[in-house]
Amino acid sequence: MSYDLSSATVGSIRQATDDAIATAESLIDTAVNAASPTYASTIVNLDEAIKVIGDASGYGPFLMNCHSDPEVREAGANAKERLDKWLADLVFRSDVFSAVEAVDESHLDGLALRSVTMWKRDLDRAGHRLQPADRSELQELRQRLIELEVAFARNLSEFDDGIDVPAESLDGLPESYIESLRDGTTAGTKRISLDYPEYQPFMQQARDRDLRRQLQHKNYNQAVAANRPLLEEAISIRHRIAELLGYATWADHQMEVKMADPESVAGLYSSIVPGLTEKALDERAALQELLAADHPGATLSVWDWTYYDTQQAKSEFGVDQNEVAAYFPLEATIDGMFDITGTVFGLRYEVADDLPAWHDDVRGYRIYDRDTGRPIAEFFLDLHPRDGKFTHAACWSLRKGCREEDGSYRLPLAAVLANFTKPTESDPSLLRHDEALTLFHEFGHVLHECLTTVEVARFAGYDTEWDFVEAPSQIMENWMWHPDVLNRFAAHHRSGEPLPDDLLDGLVRLRDHNIALKLLRQCYYGTLDLDFHTGGPEPDLGSIDRAAHHLTQLPFHEDTFFAAGFGHLMGGYDAGYYGYLWSMVYGDDMFSVFEEQGVMSPEVGARYRSEVLEPGFSRDAIDHLRAFLGREPNEEAFMKKIGLSA
């Protein structure tokens, strides 16, 4: 079922949620009361119930992240809690467990066998082998965990903070950036919020060191009073859930259904951290020299390194991101992205004005197969900031692709939310190169979700193992570092001139600049997450944060608790943030095939589309990799990129 996202109200969200739950309950009743439990009578109805709840989740729960009306956002948050709780309760139902256990799978194969296997796995993980008292506790804990996660996300979405900066203290920032800022509460000031289109350029370019420190201090304490106790309770609950189910830690429990396990992730980190640390010490020393020239005696801190990294990009590589942005107007970058992916993957895109959207900033698109003209999917791009909107960048599945009862294939629907600078009176929306990378990254999720051909919604799109889900988005970033690719669309928004050769060369070489410091920061995030979830029922989160931060090779920012604003910890990446690096290894390995045979090769693109993007979770991700690569995956391309030996 599709919902009209353009006319959502508190009442319509409540009604849609009620209807979805009622329909799903009816399907479950049919499944568990079948005279003879089979795949057709039981599993198909269970899978259909999951699809119905998923459709409703693409309505209110999605709009909690982007609707302009705070009451609608609140209704969306309430709907998310109800739907998530319904899903959590489903696997605790004894009648569902009994019905699935009775299904004979001996004659099944393909998706039918996979679906039965996954239902049995999920029901086992719901503790049906436990004593009744333990199962009851487990169910209550799951419900409470959902409440905490929804509240955590709501607090971040509604949190609003920043600093007011006198106009004379905006030295180093471009006029276009200053023009886009709101006035501060004090006359003659401008407001710098924590939204990344304002936060990141300020940290990268503002010369006033103390103002950078102040802004980062606020950023590292987002919603801390409300969210720290929620996170602490969630981690305690997760540990207890793992304990009840017989796992040593929450990480062991979570990673049972992923590609990795705690030992293999530790092995990845141990294989790269020493070499990265050695490189990072040299990178830090060069940055420290620049700081010392401006502030004798000062120690390089976390509010310094991106600023001096930006200065090095100008002085050593001839790359001024403000100058670069002039060659990446948003509309042209989107067109370039469509041209590249259209050529490589055999696609055609059209604006779909008939798709009902939730805001005037939002644009709908339709994807067609280039050879057959067949419509494949639909998606939205919502790319500019506004009050109450999700403040980072992410992709949502709004409607899963699947085979319908009448034999037709239901088109998937996805949406990207991002926060790129809005056009001004003098300029269009201009993207720094890192913002263009973000756009390509999120579009990788769109393609993974939208090019699916899987028959069953449960296995369609990007619902793969959670430590593989970033690989099809990580690989997309690689195209943004190739001169031949950039020359296809990067052009000055006024003159139409292409990127000058020297600027293009410097930009491409910039990929490896301070790469050790950047990747060690990823190692910090992943280690912080895993240590939170392997540290017992009541770990000292502050001490763990401080210890893990040592990986960054920069001093800890005192009196901050970054994790209170680390949405991934309460948004599905708990004991799973390592997946960004883990999947980068696979993304780089897959892209090495394009580099060998042509980065714009339609032949390689067709194989990647058919072996990685289309199959969704109809088979394990490792089988996607083997089929596309024609060999076992390895880390050679990744290690080469980061300057280490495999």
Image (cartoon, rainbow, N blue to C red):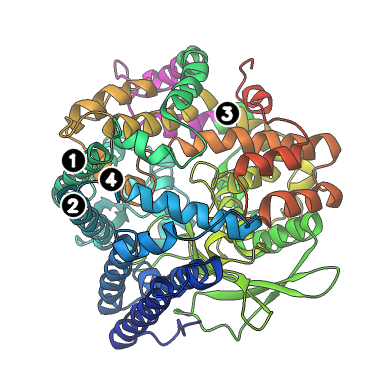
Of the two numbered discs 2 and 3 on the same chain, state the one appearing first in sequence.
2
Give coordinates of residue 561: x percent, y percent: 22, 38
Label 4 crowd bin: few (<14), some (14–19), many (20+), radius 10 Å: many
User: Which label sits on residue 315?
Assistant: 3
Question: Disc 1 on helix, strand or loop?
Answer: helix
Of the two numbered discs 2 and 1 on the same chain, state the one appearing first in sequence.
2
Question: Disc 3 on helix, strand or loop?
Answer: helix
Residue wearing tag 2: 132
Residue at position x 43%, y 49% in the image? 121
Using the rendered image of the protein, determine whether residue 445 is visible from the camera's viewpoint.
Answer: no
Residue wearing tag 1: 236
Residue type, label 2:
Pro
Residue at position x 19%, y 26% in the image? 543
Give the dominant element type of the magenta stretch: helix, strand or loop: helix
Task: Find the distance from the CA under tag 1 to the CA under tag 4.
Answer: 25 Å
**Quarter of the image where one finds residue 646:** top right
Give coordinates of residue 86: x percent, y percent: 30, 67
Residue type, label 3:
Ser
Residue at position x 62%, y 58% in the image? 111
Of the two numbered discs 2 and 4 on the same chain, state the one appearing first in sequence.
2
Range of the magenta residues? 283-312
Question: Disc 2 on helix, strand or loop?
Answer: helix
Task: Find the distance from the CA under tag 1 to the CA under tag 3.
Answer: 49 Å
Of the two numbered discs 4 and 3 on the same chain, state the one appearing first in sequence.
4
